[in-house]
């Protein structure tokens, strides 16, 4: 059905142009415009839905998986993160200092990174975040 409606849509668009520019004829032009509008609506209604198939999640039934560290657990994780995370840049291991409190786990790198480009800093933060996630999964 969509293929036929699309074909009629294209033919009617050409017909509108033909009856306006090549051979002016008001009656045929008006009929072409009417067919064009109807086929436009039919194509819009019958067009397939191209949205990716994702399951609908009811917000009220969805529970977010999250865990909040207490102060002691956060500090223990920071130590674990410092010992087990390994971020390699240009063949060298990046040294960093890990810290934590009940709200945040952070990693700080040395002064050598202060003059690096924004892209390099984003790379470093993404690599540290990946290692943090790996440590959480494995730890």
Image: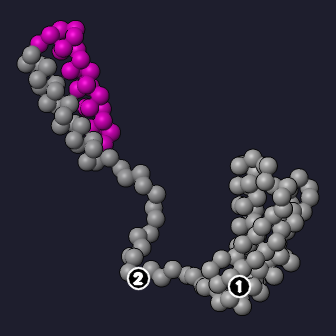
The label on residue 74 is 1
Nearer the observer: mark 1 or 2; the answer is 1
Q: Up-down: is 70 above or below 35? A: below
Task: Residue 119: give x, y in percent of width and height.
Answer: 72, 49
Q: Is residue 45 magenta?
A: no
Location of mark 2 (residue): 61
Task: Residue 50: give x, y in percent of width and height.
Answer: 41, 51
The N terminus sits in image quarter: top left
Nearer-N-terminus badge (1/2): 2
Does any portion of residue 25 appear in the rendered image? yes
Q: Nearer the viewer, residue 109 or 25?
A: 109
> Callout 1 environment at 10 Å: few (<14), some (14 to 19), or many (20+)?
some
Task: Residue 55: give x, y in percent of width and height.
Answer: 44, 69
Residue 73 left/right relative to 32 = right
The reply to whether dot 1 and dot 2 touch (C-beta < 8 Å) is no
Q: Which residue is drawn at 14% across and 19% down?
A: 29
Q: Which residue is drawn at 60% across and 85% down?
A: 67
Does any portion of residue 138 appear in the rendered image? no
């Amino acid at each position: 059905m969509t293929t036929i409606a699309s074909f009629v849509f294209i033919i009617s668009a050409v017909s509108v142009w033909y009856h306006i520019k090549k051979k002016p004829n008001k009656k045929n032009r008006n009929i072409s415009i009417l067919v064009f509008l109807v086929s436009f609506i039919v194509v819009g209604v019958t067009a397939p839905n191209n949205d990716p198939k994702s399951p609908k999640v009811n917000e009220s039934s969805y529970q977010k998986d999250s865990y909040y560290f207490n102060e002691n657990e956060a500090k223990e994780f920071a130590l674990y993160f410092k010992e087990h995370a390994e971020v390699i840049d240009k063949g060298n291991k990046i040294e960093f200092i890990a810290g934590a409190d009940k709200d945040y786990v952070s990693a700080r790198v040395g002064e050598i990174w202060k003059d690096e480009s924004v892209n390099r800093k984003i790379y470093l933060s993404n690599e540290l975040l990946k290692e943090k996630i790996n440590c959480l999964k494995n730890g």
